[in-house]
Every structure is written in structure tokens, then in C-alpha cells.
Amino acid sequence: MYSRLICSWRWGSIVAESEQPIVRRDGVRLLASSPGALVAEMQRLRASLRDTATEIRPDGCQVFVRDHFDGVWATGLMKAVTDLGATGIEINEWWASLAPDWICPCCQRPKAEIVHLSDGVLIAKAVEHHDHFTSYVSRSFTRDLGAEWGKNKPHLQDIQRQITDAFSAFSPVMICESCNQADRDAKAIVGRLLKVPKDELEYFSFSVDEIRSFIRPAGNRHHVPDDEKVVDVFEKKRKREVLRFRIETVDQQVRLAVQDVHWRSPESHPSGGDLYEGTWDVLHELGMTPGGNFDLLEFSATTRTGTMPANTWRRNRDRRTAAPSEAKIKEYLAARPHLSDLGATWRCPCCNRSLSAIIRMNNKRQPTMLIGPVGHGDDRIEVCMDCLDVWRGLAKEAGVERDEVTRSDVLAVIVPVRNSRHKLRSHVAADEQVAVIAARAAIRSEEAVRPSEGFYVVI
């Protein structure tokens, strides 16, 4: 029997014109008549993506989509469809934006173990988990100051940001959908067993470490929170008491803000951290990076009083700056042949960012981008200024020479950001890595000393 073939505009799905097509789009899901038919369609989409990527790929580009992204075309998901017998697939953009080797920081499962079936459909989702108390802060300002308060009293927006940061239990974090669901299930357990009202729990969230403590992760299925462990976490950490304190304190602050009474000055001027950023950029430009062969600041000053704290490098890492336009990036590289000569395929061997992703705006709102050496001999590599900044910062905090810091040390504490300084994973992560570096350097120092005829010889 003859069947006319139709091509779907979004998925490019080739389906038979009949009452039961082999592959069809149903809302946010791609459905098929069998796992084999679904895999065949995914393979066709992969071939289509390969053709498109090849056509638009810049000359010399060594980056591959498969290494950084995921999707309906990915071999890992094809395997999951086959292994689990799925006849449909649903993937959200967070999941597609995460590399195939991503591991959920909460349950520690890789992607292959996170995917699960729902009515025969393979679900592949990641979500940004956040503290719902941030919603309470936002609603409190609207409740007491009106819906247009941001326009009528813009200076109070800084107050809201400060209160939100101060009273949030944790920063937003990407986790798998199952861990996020476990947070909701755990709150239901608290409401049921401890009789905490739903309207109170609306503004409460468990953190990643707390969720991890009351779930037992298993492959390809949702977590089931342990009732006893959930209650134990909630009561031992006096969560209800702390939540009420946060609510009462925010209410008090907002009531004062209504009267335009608050603790924040409306003025904002450069801080030590701002000075550090500007100084670091200029020293880079001059080739006088602190920690190198020449320390301009030490040469210029007559006293070390006022020396920047060892952890100054950590400051202002979450501040977002506007990225330079593509035209500015091209203009910047054209004026600096020594950078252009690196080639379009060059990437920082530490953070893996390309030249165009490293260039950012400095404090004077001008594009800046530099590379510098770390290591000696065969271990010597050229890294971007933002990796070098972290390299130097870790060494200074640990009280060691910069060569004691490794690429792995830097990667353990940063989150690379395009056209911006690296974000810090957390201060805890930085503290831990500084301790690791210091301990490692101490061991090397001991091993470098060997007894020889009654004397100690440095090897």
C-alpha cells in the first residue's frame, strides 16, 4: 500500500500518513510505536545534526557537540531507550545543556542512571534547585510596598538582594529531577508527620546535602525519601524554628523599608576586591603578574601594610558583566597578532575556553584577554589570565610557590564562565583545596630532604 511521507518542521520526523504513525510528536514528547522505531528516528536526527554541524563548523574547530551537549540524537539516550524499552522520550533544555558525563551533585548518579520511565516514556530532566524562601522575600516586598515598588523605590532593590542572599539556605544548584522531587516528597512527609502547615512549608527547601542524607539512590527510578531520616534532619536542625525566625526577621526589615528606614547606603564605590580586579588586569597587560619574576607592588610600596588579604581573589566572582560584542572581539584579536597567531582552535588547557570565550570587559569597560605561563620544563603550559588568577590565589592562600598548584586544583574550585571571570564553586570547596595543596607541599618538602653523612641535602 502506498503511503505518502511527511517531514515534521521541528523534529524532521519522517512518518507514514496513517492513523497510527510510526513516530509522532505529542506535546513535549516524541513518541514511537516501538523502541526500535524510536531509536531509528533518533539515529536519523543524529545524522541530520551531523550534517548541519559539519556545514556551519568553523575551519579548524576541534570542539564536538557530542562532548558538551545531550539530546534526542545522543547515543547514551539511544542505549537507554533500548535497555529500558522506551517508546517515547522527553528531554528538557537543562538536560540538553549538560554534558553526557554530568553527575548529579545530590545523588551522585551519572546520566545513564538518572533517566527513568514514565508510562513507557524515557524522562531525561535536570532542574535548578533553589531555596523557596527567596519567594517569601520577594512577596513580602510586594505585599507591603505594592506591585510597582521596584519602580517607585528602586534603591530598595539592593536591600531585597541583600536580604535574599543573607537568608537563603543555599545558592541555586543544578540537580536531577528525581532529587528535586525528593525535596517535595520530604516536605510532604514533614507536613504529615510533624503537622507543619503547608503554607509554612511553601517557603522552605531542603539543601542538596540534606536531600542526599535521606534518600537511597537507585538506577533509573525516582528516590523514595526515608520518613525517619527526613524527620530527623528537620528536627535536629530545628528547621521550623529557623524558618519562623527568617520569616519574622524579613517581615521586620520590610516594615522598616516601607518607612525608608534601612541599613544600606545608597552609594556604591570601588572596594578592595574591585581594586584587585583592576590592578590584576593592568599588571597582566604590563607582563608584571604578581608571583612572577617581578612584583611591581612590592617594588612600589615601602610597607606591606595594606597588603590585600590572601583570599581577595575569591571576591566578586558572582558579579555578571556584559560580554563584549562579536565585533569588539574580532577587533581586539585583529590588533593583537600574538593572540590571533594561536589559531582559531586554541583553547585554554585549563578551563578549555576558546579565545573568543576568554575575552571579557575590564573595569574600564574595555576588552581584555591575556595568557600566561605556569609550570616549568615539560610541565609548562600557557593558560588564560582567569585561570592564572585562581592559580596564584590558591598558591598565596596555601603559602606555597605557584608551581605547587596543579591544573586539577584549579578545576576543583572554578566554574568557567564565557566572557567573564571564573565563578567559585563554593568557599568550602576553595578552603578544602587550599588545605590539600598545603598538605601536599608539606609532604614534598619532607621528601626533598634526605640524610647524607650527618647532613641534610636538599634534592
Image: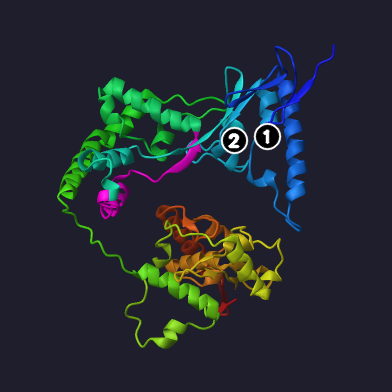
Provide residue 310's location: percent of width, then percent of height: 40, 69
Q: Is residue 455 visible?
A: no
Q: Disc 2 to disc 1, how far (Cα)?
A: 8 Å
Residue under the point 58% across and 66% down:
328
Q: Which residues are magenta?
A: 152-176
Label 2 packing within 10 angstroms: few (<14), some (14-19), many (20+): many
Provide residue 176's location: percent of width, then percent of height: 51, 35
Nearest the eye: 326 or 32: 326
Can residue 374 be found in the magenta stretch? Answer: no
Label 1 packing within 10 angstroms: few (<14), some (14-19), many (20+): some
Horizontal side of residue 238 vs 282, given as left or right: left
Q: Is residue 155 visible?
A: yes
Location of the C terminus (image quadrant): bottom right
Mark 2 is on which residue type? Lys
Residue under the point 75% across and 17% down:
17
Label placed on residue 287: none
Can residue 168 be found in the magenta stretch? Answer: yes
Residue under the point 50% across and 67% down:
389
Provide residue 43's location: percent of width, then percent of height: 75, 32
Residue under the point 61% across and 18% down:
120
At mark 1, the secondary structure is helix
Disc 2, disc 1: CB below 8 Å?
yes
The image quadrant of residue 15 is top right
Q: Which residue is mark 1?
A: 76
Considering only vertical position in the picture, is 429 above or below 452? above
Q: Which residue is mark 2?
A: 111
Mark 1 is on which residue type? Gly
